[in-house]
Image (cartoon, rainbow, N blue to C red):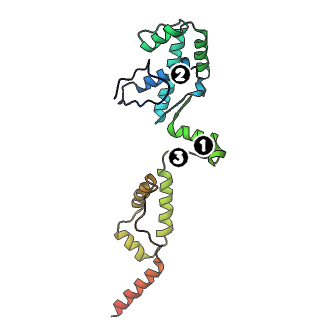
Amino acid sequence: MMKPFDIISNPLEGANIIEASAGTGKTHAIAGLFLRLILEQELLIKEILVVTFTEAATEELRDRIRKRLKDAFDVLTGAQTPSGDVLLEKLADRYRGNARSIDSLSNALTDFDEAAIYTIHGFCQRMLRENAFESNALFDTELVTNQTALLQVLVDDFWRKHFYIAAPIFIQYAVSKKYSPDMYMELIKKRSIEPEIAIVPTFDKPDIDGEQIALQEAFDRLIAA
């Protein structure tokens, strides 16, 4: 059964699935949960992981979380009033003037550069780099988020290798079937998206040179007839 998300009383333990459309306050909720983890769970900022999809969303999260921590620090030290912010009002009632809580927020702001706020692929790259021996990854491994340029290199190499030195009759056949680098690019994109896709039917590499010779000989016999 679905129920409204309560940023103030929602449990910080376990897993929660939140369904929300664009512009409904997901970033605001994440920043609030981050703040609660600092104050209620007394976690260090480097002990909290936040991941999202895009670089733009990552930067927005980083800015919003830092501002949330700063606002909370100002409220707890008396430099600012909650101004109708329900979460800050509740936290102020509980932690205002609390030296331990104020120190936690001060340390979080000081160490904010250590905050683990990443895109999903950025976090994966960090884990591979920091655990290179366990993951058998190279130290200079680069995580490629867009394979288009790499796939284009593969297609261009394949086209040069198999078509630039091919016999004219083979080229004529390929042109008649509308084979082109663009067609192979679409084909390899499908394979890269679904790497486990089966190739049907399976067959051995044909002897193109031999087949061309046999075809030419048959054509010569037809002319002679």
Q: Which residue is mark 2?
A: 37
First in sequence, mark 1 or 3: give its number: 1
Q: Are marks 1 and 2 in contact (CB under 8 Å)?
A: no
SS at badge 2: helix
Q: Quadrant of residue 110?
A: top right
Q: Amino acid at mark 2?
A: Leu
Q: Are marks 3 and 2 in contact (CB under 8 Å)?
A: no
Which residue does the image show at 61% across and 14% down from the upper left? 103
Q: Which residue is mark 1?
A: 128
| Front in this rendered view, residue 10 or 92 | 10
SS at badge 3: loop
Which residue does the image show at 55% across and 20% down from the upper left? 41
First in sequence, mark 3 or 2: give its number: 2
The mark lying in front, picked from 3 and 2, is: 2
Farthest bottom residue in view: 225
Residue 173, placed above or below residue 59: below
Q: Quadrant of the N terminus?
A: top left
Farthest right residue in view: 133
Q: Which residue is mark 3?
A: 144
- Count of marks overlaid on the render: 3
Tag 3: Cα neighbours inside 10 Å, few (<14), some, or many (≥20)? few
